[in-house]
Amino acid sequence: MCDGWTDGKGRSLTNFLVNSPSGSVFMKSIDTSNVIKDGKKMFELLDSIVEEIGEENVVQVVTDGAANLVTAGRMLMEKRTKLFWSPCAAHCLDLVLEDIGELPILEIYHILPKVCDSNCKSVKTCRQYHYDKNFNPDSEVLIGLYETLERMVPDRRTRFAMDQLEKFKGAKGLFGMNMAIDTRDKKQP
């Protein structure tokens, strides 16, 4: 993760942190005044940080959503196909709230009920659909899932086995035939 800020002297500083299941650890702080506005140079900096940590130890890089870092993040994902870049949700939310703050008050009153209704409905319907055996997820969701699997599990045979496991658990395709279901709990020699 990286987080930028400006010190009392007007310098742009970027803190780099490493997050793991054990928690977050400060790695280093770099004066990025000369490179902060250049997406390619920020890519080079992020790439060097990933190299220092070891690509095999990095799953995701999180930055704010500024255009230069969006460029850097995309370049990083092109070079290192097993990792993901994403903008910080808090930063995105902050930008959205700033935009809402610039709207006339009457427009905000018209927007809020729609947002609340759609969010409440989506939470309720998500649970409803998630447990429905006949539910078919959106194709964009499936595409995203498979893109993620390709990045995380590069071996095609392993991905195929994972897909077969889902079909087995759901008794789909050939696994749904009576013979397959009857022999499911029996050990093969």
Image: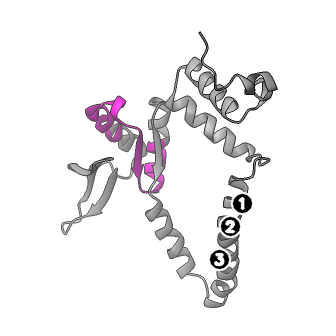
Horizontal arrangement in the rendering, residue 118 relative to residue 157 (left or right): right
Specify the amino acid type for callout 3: Cys
Q: Residue 140's x, y, as percent?
A: 70, 45
Mark 3 secondary-structure assignment:
helix
Q: CA distance from mark 2 to mark 1?
A: 6 Å
Q: Which residue is mark 3?
A: 116
Specify the amino acid type for callout 2: Lys
Image point (39%, 40%), residue name: 43
Specify the amino acid type for callout 1: Gln
Q: Cβ–Cβ below 8 Å for labels 3 and 1?
A: no
Question: Can you tell which quarter of the image residue 66 is in?
Answer: bottom left
Q: Which residue is mark 1?
A: 128
Q: Which residues are magenta?
A: 45-73
Point out the image quarter for the C terminus.
top right
Q: Nearer the viewer, residue 163 or 41?
A: 163
Single out the mark in the foreground, 3 or 1: 1
| Residue reaching furthest to the bottom | 106
Question: Can you tell which quarter of the image residue 113 is in?
Answer: bottom right
Q: Residue 134's x, y, as percent?
A: 80, 47
Mark 3 surroundings: few (<14), some (14-19) or many (≥20) residues within 10 A: few
Q: Which residue is mark 2?
A: 124
Q: CA distance from mark 3 to mark 1?
A: 18 Å
2 or 3: tag closer to the N-terminus: 3
